[in-house]
Image (tube, helix red, strand yellow):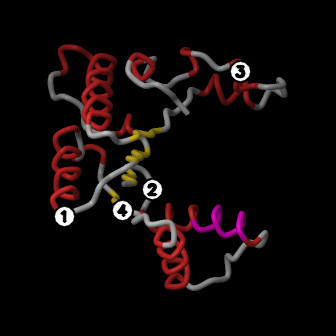
Amino acid sequence: LFISLENEASDNLMSMYRSVYESLTQSSGLDRPDEEVIEFIYEYFNRRGWVLLMERRVGSEFGYEELRALYEDYTKQGYRILTTIIDYMNKMKKNDNNRDGNYLALESLYENVVNYITSKGCTFITAHQLTTDASKLASSGVNNVVRKFNFEHLEHGKAPFKVCDVII
């Protein structure tokens, strides 16, 4: 289950197509019509016994409760979700209780989502945006720059590190 809160589904599909097609054929394949791209991705997953479920949602309207409802709807339809990807989880609707501030609301969102998804035996993947300081460090020419990143380079703080096993 791939949920994008940032890009349109067609953009994500093209990005996925380019990556998979280039790795399999060593050529770009960018001149293919949309129908052929969709068929290629469908067949790629289908041959492996998988179905790709891709959703585009508006972050301000999609929070933990909406994720649960979506997950349960797909489960009722007979899907067994093995992996859930949310691009970018930080854009999800947070608890309306602003007295705790954005940091605690984000931490609560991560706790709820990660605990729910993993309790279903599902792998959860999300990206976490980096700060402008991380961009400066990345363009500084430092070798192995990823090893230099730490909590201070995460946009909106270190909330994800408290509940996630891996942060990308």
Q: Amino acid at mark 3?
A: Arg
Pick the front one: 86 or 82: 82
- For discs 4 and 1, the disc positioned in front in the rendered view: 1
- For discs 3 and 4, the disc positioned in front in the rendered view: 4
The residue drawn where x is 22% and y is 38% is 64
Which mark is first along the chain, 2 or 1?
A: 2
Q: What whole-number distance in Å separates the C-alpha atoms at marks 1 and 3?
A: 43 Å
> Which mark is drawn over residue 7?
2
Q: Is residue 3 magenta?
A: no
Which mark is first along the chain, 4 or 3?
A: 4
Crowd tier of the residue under label 4, counting other residues whose Cα lies within 10 Å: few below 14, some 14–19, many 20 or above: few
- The quarter of the picture where the N terminus appears is bottom left
> In the rendered image of this protein, does residue 117 appear above or below residue 132?
below
Q: Amino acid at mark 2?
A: Asn
Q: What whole-number distance in Å separates the C-alpha atoms at marks 3 and 4?
A: 33 Å
The residue drawn where x is 56% and y is 26% is 131
Disc 1 is placed on an element classified as loop
Which mark is first along the chain, 2 or 3?
A: 2
> Which mark is drawn over residue 147?
3
Which mark is first along the chain, 1 or 4?
A: 4
Q: Amino acid at mark 1?
A: Gln
The residue drawn where x is 38% and y is 21% is 163
Q: Which residues are magenta?
A: 17-24
